[in-house]
Amino acid sequence: MGKIEVKKDKPSSGEQEKNKLKRTKKQKKKKFWKNNPTIATQQAEIKKISAILPPKKPEDFSSNWKALQALLTSEKSSTITESAPAKPFKKEEKLPKLGRQKADPLIKENASSVSTVKEVPTDDRKPKSATENAGIINKGSEKRRLLQAKGDEKPSKHHKKKAAETSIPETPKLDLWFDDVDPDDIEAALGPEAGQIARKMQGLPEKKSDAVDMILVKDRAFEGLTRTVAIDCEMVGVGTDGEESIVARVSIVNQFGKCIYDKYVRPTERVTDYRTEFSGIRPGNIKNGEDFKVVQKEVSEILRGRILVGHAVHNDLKILFLDHPKKATRDTQKYKPFRKEVKSGRPSLKLLCEKILNVRVQTGEHSSVQDAQAAMRLYTMEKKNWESGIKEKYNKTKVEPKKIEQTSLD
């Protein structure tokens, strides 16, 4: 008999396309795994690793865990027999019962060398609290407790370290200062506290508060010579009783309160009273001061052709052996509106500042710079009225002689 040939139906065009897609996908996968062999190994390792579940039956516990349990029970019995005379444990300090616990992979195989157990808290189990951890007592801690009860405890290494740390005294902080350094420079570099300490160490008066300077001195103003200047001098006593005075310091400020001249004067006679509580002058200030004649010449050049302001300024001119025109002199002590306001015939600079400027000056040792600034501030407050009054005064004196001459001619 002849063979019967079974003709297979050719796959349709849609099936052919599907087969082609499957082949292309397989080819792409092969190429991807060839190009990325590390990913394949990682996935293989992940498949190999299986989760180790904790043992449920007591037979499944490891020999290490059983040995550790036996060791802890033996220690417990030995400590109870040794610590019979000691105080009984409180309810909170009782050892917890060792029940079924999860096998820990960190336990060593040698049961005899095991002293402590490292427990790694997993996501399923919370870490033990301090009271629960206190129940598991190792050998060393139990011995220390027994020694504490007997009173024969030896200090541990940690206690020795703490005792050594507490016994070592702190090294005292040394304040190193240089006598020839200006306290203002120290204050600029290290701060106001350092400046105050430097002034105390050098025996200098404390710097006045910035609040006073804000009122007496104009901020960001011209710092050179102006048409109007104010002067003040500090004096020391000479002679047997120190009643006679000589100049020790001269300070001049401009119209805005900026100091343009400030010098200590070397004494021409032996000083018997420095008047430090009022003048602020000390022997070290005037020992290396400027020569009197040099200061006198420099001050006279500054005052020439300018309006001079001061408080009882005639005393300052007298001590410097200088003279200044009355027309160009403004004395805050003699200004009548100030006298009326303060109700005093000869008001002090301190009183005028308190009543008019609402500022306290000369609270301790005087400063010639600050006194000159205070006098200038008083003048600038009444400058318009003061100058208009002087113009009227001198205009009348000029007109009156002319009228007298005309009447005599008639």
Image (cartoon, rainbow, N blue to C red):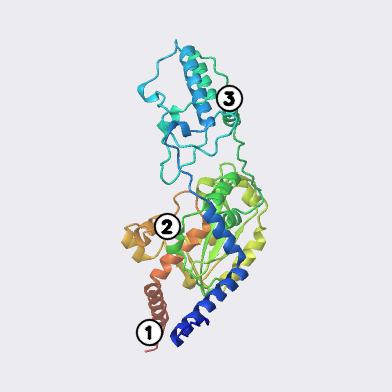
Q: Given the image, on which type of amino acid does mark 3 rest?
A: Ser
Q: Which mark is residue 403?
A: 1
Disc 1 residue crowd, few under 14, some 14–19, many 20+, Cα 10 Å: few
Disc 3 residue crowd, few under 14, some 14–19, many 20+, Cα 10 Å: few
Q: Position of residue 83 (x, y in %)?
A: 47, 13
Q: Is residue 359 visible?
A: yes
Q: Position of residue 349 (x, y in %)?
A: 42, 57
- Residue 323 as seen in the image, left or right of residue 178: left
- Label 1 or label 3, whichever lies nearer to me, is 3
Tell me the element at label 3.
loop
Tell me the element at label 1.
helix
Q: Are marks 1 and 3 in contact (CB under 8 Å)?
A: no
What's the CA distance linking mark 3 and mark 2?
73 Å
**Residue 350's image quarter?**
bottom left
- Label 3 or label 2, whichever lies nearer to me, is 3
- Above or below, comparing residue 302 to residue 244 in the picture: below
Q: Given the image, on which type of amino acid does mark 2 rest?
A: Leu
The residue tagged 3 is 156
Q: Position of residue 223 (x, y in %)?
A: 55, 71
Residue at image position (54%, 14%) is 152
In depth, the one of 36 and 126 nearer the eye is 36
Tell me the element at label 2.
helix
Query: Reading the chain from its start, which is encountered first: label 3 or label 2?
Result: 3
- Label 2 or label 1, whichever lies nearer to me, is 2
- Above or below, comparing residue 159 to residue 389 in the picture: above
